[in-house]
């Protein structure tokens, strides 16, 4: 079936603007993860959902970051009042069940905050 | 913060040569995974090695794990230009609920 799909692929925002990034996981995958990847670095964990429940949001850098997965499938990562330091690639991954299972990644959304 | 540290940060080799990348970590783990990322793309899972395993093979890939030294290595044999990518180790914690990535090794294979 289709892989993990993320949209938009690229997003340019003015500082202070709100943005919403979308992730469509692989059908039937219970777990969904968001990561932030700065240029030249490895991905850093942001948050994790099991179905619609957000089980871990310890990686969210500030209260400007908010994620939801209301029906246990599609997820949205929202960043309010964007700052330049939010510029990064935001990766979404899904797995059959938890972090113990292999995670399948989307191509990411590259966010540039001017 | 990233728990895994990869070495070298960058590696350039000729096609046909072998490439070795290393990953060191500090805390105990459930398993260790290696991922590849082509420029501008998402990560692709390559291989997983559990904490009670010492070596694993998959095609041209060979992974070793030494839990006493808290280190792992990824060997790519007979490299091809298409192997050019960044390679990341990822550590699953003992609770099995979080995967943390290293900083990556950028591999360039020249034709």
Image (tube, helix red, strand yellow):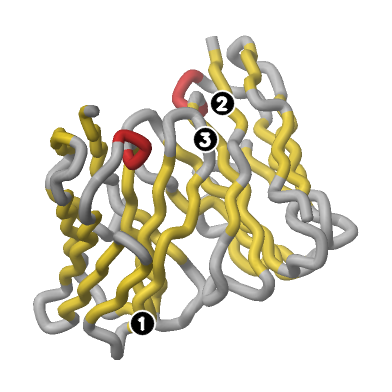
| Residue named by callout 2 | A110
Vertical side of B69 occupied by A103: above or below: above
* Mark pair 2, 1: CA separation: 32 Å
Residue pushed farthest right? A71
Is residue A113 found left or right of B68 in the rendered image? Answer: right
Q: Which mark is residue A108?
A: none
Q: Are marks 2 and 1 on the same chain?
A: no
Quadrant of residue B14 in the image?
Answer: top left
Residue appearing at x 12%, y 83% in the figure: B68
| Residue named by callout 1 | B50
Label 2: which secondary element: strand
Whole-percent x and y of residue B1? 32, 51
Residue appearing at x 24%, y 38% in the figure: B107
Vertical side of B65 occupied by B111: above or below: above
Whole-percent x and y of residue A93? 61, 53
Quadrant of residue A38 in the image?
Answer: top left
CB contact under 8 Å: marks 2 and 1: no
Nearest to the observer: residue A37 or residue A28 = A28
Label 1 marks which chain's residue?
Answer: B
- The reply to whether residue B88 is visible in this rendering is yes
| Residue named by callout 3 | B41
Is residue A51 found left or right of B16 in the rendered image? Answer: right
Is residue B11 found left or right of B98 in the rendered image? Answer: left
Whole-percent x and y of residue B5? 20, 54
Q: Are marks 2 and 3 on the same chain?
A: no
């Amino acid at each position: 079936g289709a892989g993990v799909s993320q949209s938009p692929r690229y997003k340019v925002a003015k500082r202070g603007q709100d943005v919403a990034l979308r992730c469509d996981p692989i059908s039937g995958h219970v777990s969904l993860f968001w990561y932030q990847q700065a240029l030249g670095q490895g991905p850093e964990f942001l948050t994790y959902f099991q179905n619609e429940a957000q089980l871990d949001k310890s990686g969210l850098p500030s209260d400007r970051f908010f994620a939801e997965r209301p029906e246990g499938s599609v997820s949205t990562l929202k960043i309010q009042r964007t700052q330049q330091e939010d510029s990064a690639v935001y990766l979404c991954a899904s797995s059959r069940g938890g972090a113990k299972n292999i995670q399948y990644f989307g191509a990411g959304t590259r966010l540039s905050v001017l | 913060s990233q728990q895994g540290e990869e070495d070298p940060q960058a590696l350039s080799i000729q096609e046909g040569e072998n490439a070795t990348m290393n990953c060191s970590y500090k805390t105990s783990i459930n398993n260790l995974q290696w991922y590849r990322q082509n420029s501008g793309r998402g990560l692709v899972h390559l291989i997983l090695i559990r904490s009670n395993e010492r070596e694993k093979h998959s095609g041209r890939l060979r992974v070793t794990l030494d839990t006493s030294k808290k280190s792992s290595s990824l060997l790519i044999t007979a490299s091809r230009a298409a192997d050019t990518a960044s390679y990341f180790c990822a550590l699953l914690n003992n609770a099995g609920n979080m995967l943390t990535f290293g900083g990556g090794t950028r591999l360039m294979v020249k034709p």
